Image (tube, helix red, strand yellow):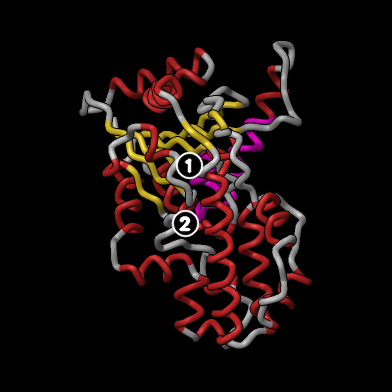
Amino acid sequence: MNIVYLIGNGFDLNLNLKTSYNHFYDYYKNLPTTNDSKIVSDFKKELWNKSDKWSYLELQLGKYLVNLNANDAVILHDHLVEQLSKYITSEEEKYSFDEKQKNIFREHLNNPFKKLLPEEISELSKYRSQMNNSSTYIRIITFNYTRIIDNFGVDSSAIEHIHGFTDARMILGVNDLSQIKNTELQKNTGVLYRYVKSACNSTYRLGHEQKCQQWINQAQLICLFGLSFGDTDKNWWVEVGTALQRGCKAIIFEHNDEKTYNKNQGPAQIEAEDKVKDYFLSKTNLDKDSINSAKKNIYVAYNTDMFKLNVNKKE
């Protein structure tokens, strides 16, 4: 069975790393300003803090470009990437992992079915038994800049960092041209290569997007963990939607501390799970009939202990 994981910032947050947009915002706003260029200084005055999701920052950047020229847009992006790289690196270096935690990670990775309810486990087990391939192949597409996952003993050839690393091809931007709210800058390659994710990936000519698309196309089960399904990564939700349409199954691992359900609240939990499915499917390009069909292929693992590893913080 071919299993593909799409993993977002919720994974690092689950390990108690402070890698949300809000964490970076607090760090960035308190940086010294003496050496800032005018464009950076102006940007800091306008910096937004209404969400903890990185997609919020990325969308706001696309809107902020409306009043910038190409040179200022390039300066601002290069500056943000530099500061974000420093922050994420410093946060990543605070944590360590032992063999017990690595074993738990691999156990969870190899057995995502176990986080579902008994009837769902039975359905997916039957589905799995229908596969022509008896072996299990696991691949991971991570949207995070950290190398945390690489340290858990997974074969490096089975991991793709679609947004790069803190020290290599770091990508921060929007999904497509429509999210850049400056028609003149939409024509500027220097801006596009920085702000549009697919264009940025293409500058490195390493084939990362093509490999991830191939993995999703070959997947028989897709597991989505720690993702907010933001519009600045819409291309990937469209890819998953297409996979669901052809019959691929998916498990969405949803965590919500504000909404927990006891054993008398089965109907309420099912309603919450339906909302998760509907929200994700609204991010795809599927039509109404296709959405109704694809919805049957989605399972929601709600508030499980998936990838809860109690990572150690270095002294």
Label 1 Cα neighbours within 10 Å, binned few <14 / some 14-19 / many ≥20: many
Magenta stretch in the rendered image: 272-294
| Residue type pointed to by label 1 | Ile
Residue at the front extreme? 315
Q: Is residue 282 magenta?
A: yes
Q: Is residue 183 magenta?
A: no
Q: Secondary structure at mark 2?
A: loop
Q: How many marks?
A: 2
Could you say which is closer to the camera, residue 301 or residue 97?
Answer: 97
Could you say which is closer to the camera, residue 169 or residue 62?
Answer: 169
What secondary structure predominates along the stretch shown in magenta?
A: helix
Looking at the image, residue 117 sits to the left or right of residue 201; the answer is right
Percent across and percent down for residue 71 are 56, 87
* Residue that label 2 marks: 166
Instruction: Answer with mark 2 or mark 1, whichever residue precedes in sequence.
Output: 1
Per the rendering, the mark at residue 7 is: 1
Q: Secondary structure at mark 1?
A: strand
Question: Is the N terminus in the top left, top right, bottom left or bottom right quadrant?
Answer: top left
Q: Nearer the viewer, mark 2 or mark 1?
A: 2
| Residue type pointed to by label 2 | Thr
- Asked if the residues shown at circle 2 and circle 1 are in contact, with their CB atoms under 8 angstroms apart, the answer is no
Residue at 33% x, 32% y is: 153
Residue at 49% x, 49% y is: 144
Label 2 Cα neighbours within 10 Å, binned few <14 / some 14-19 / many ≥20: many
